[in-house]
Image (cartoon, grey):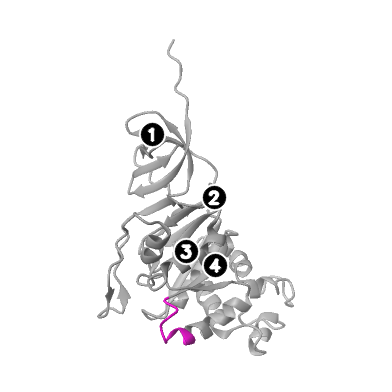
């Protein structure tokens, strides 16, 4: 009687459409595929593999958390099982603080810790961006200033305590220097950095696939997930309650409004709107909340 083949536990470290690479503890990652047309496996997933050439992804184990991205048609999970989200921004190209804010909401809804990375800190325009990030600092989000291109080794040393022993992910608008930062953290991967497109005032999309890399010279289990730049986080799966809990300045006031189901728009006795009027909540953050709320209620 033929013995059934034993499943092998592994971690997805690269996703190229429906083709994957998985780390099963060997010298090199294993090529693997999914059954049929299933395409919901993402970088960071813990899976069970059936032996083969390529190996077959038999089971996706329960996720601790996940992040979603939005395209023209639908939301799609693109990363799972993260410990830290590195939200990178810079004074050039024009800062996309809506994307930054949505990234923080997405992470907050999944209980993923965040670090704001202010890259290209040598630029003179950084002073204005620093001012605009101050409300986020006051909400409890730490901000780390660095220059991945101008001082790469100093940038690596500044990030080392944050990355040690954790699975982290770089996120941010195209052109803010994610690939340059990845090159500094992962010498030898030769990620294409690309040049800024002045005509479009944005960076060219230079990363073509999501990849999870082991960080050299750091404790075991230190890994960095690098993903393509994109312009929209998927938040449509959130409930209004989840959205309100994902913004710290709203979460600390939950339950204090006159009405338990207050949406913080027009209801009387709303402590959130009172806080905005009193200057205790940043108007830009409140405006972001209202934009996302409208999208959820449509």
Horizontal side, residue 220 vs residue 17: left or right: right
Q: Which residue is mark 1?
A: 56
Percent across and percent down for residue 6 are 47, 25
Mark 3 to mark 1 CA distance (whole Å): 37 Å
- 1 vs 2, front mark: 2
Q: Which residue is mark 3?
A: 156
Q: Which residues are magenta?
A: 120-128
Could you tell which of marks 3 and 1 lies nearer the N-terminus?
1
Q: Which residue is mark 4?
A: 115
Label 1 CA crowd tier, 10 Å (few <14, some 14–19, many 20+)? some
Secondary structure under tag 3 reads helix
Mark 4 to mark 2 CA distance (whole Å): 20 Å
Residue at 64 percent across and 89 percent down: it is: 277
Secondary structure under tag 2 reads loop
Q: Which residue is mark 2?
A: 219
Q: Quadrant of residue 199?
A: bottom left
Mark 1 to mark 2 CA distance (whole Å): 30 Å
Determine the residue located farthest toward the top in the rendered image. 1
Mark 3 to mark 4 CA distance (whole Å): 14 Å
Does residue 26 appear anywhere in the picture? yes
- 3 vs 4, front mark: 3
- 1 vs 4, front mark: 4
Percent across and percent down for residue 295 are 48, 71
| Callouts 2 and 3 close, C-beta under 8 Å | no
Q: Which mark is residue 108?
A: none
Percent across and percent down for residue 153 are 44, 66
Horizontal side, residue 96 vs residue 135: left or right: left
7 or 220: nearer the eye? 220
How would you classify the magenta stretch by its main secondary structure? loop
Secondary structure under tag 4 reads strand
Q: Quadrant of residue 268?
A: bottom right
């Amino acid at each position: 009687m033929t013995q059934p083949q034993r499943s092998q536990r592994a971690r997805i470290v690269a996703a190229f459409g429906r083709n994957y690479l998985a780390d099963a503890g060997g010298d090199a990652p294993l090529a693997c595929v999914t059954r049929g047309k299933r395409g919901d496996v993402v970088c960071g997933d813990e899976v069970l593999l059936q032996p083969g050439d390529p190996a077959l992804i038999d089971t996706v184990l329960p996720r601790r958390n996940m992040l979603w991205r939005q395209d023209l048609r639908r939301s799609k999970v693109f990363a799972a099982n993260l410990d830290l989200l590195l939200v990178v921004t810079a004074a050039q190209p024009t800062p996309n603080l809506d994307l930054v804010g949505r990234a923080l909401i997405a992470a907050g809804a999944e209980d993923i810790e965040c670090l704001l990375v202010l890259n290209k800190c040598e630029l003179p325009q950084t002073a204005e961006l620093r001012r605009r990030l101050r409300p986020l600092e006051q909400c409890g989000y730490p901000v780390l200033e660095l220059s991945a291109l101008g001082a790469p080794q100093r940038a690596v040393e500044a990030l080392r305590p944050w990355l040690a022993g954790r699975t982290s992910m770089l996120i941010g608008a195209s052109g803010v220097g994610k690939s340059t930062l990845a090159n500094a953290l992962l010498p030898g991967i030769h990620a294409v950095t690309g040049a800024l497109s002045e005509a479009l005032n944005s960076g060219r999309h230079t990363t073509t696939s999501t990849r999870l890399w082991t960080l050299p010279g750091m404790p075991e289990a230190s890994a960095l997930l690098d993903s393509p730049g994109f312009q929209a986080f998927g938040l449509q799966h959130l409930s209004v309650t989840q959205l309100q809990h994902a913004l710290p300045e709203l979460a600390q006031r939950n339950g204090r409004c006159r009405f338990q189901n207050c949406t913080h728009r027009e209801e009387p006795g709303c402590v959130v709107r009172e806080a905005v009027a009193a200057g205790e909540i940043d108007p830009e953050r409140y405006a972001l909340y209202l934009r996302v709320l409208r999208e959820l209620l449509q």
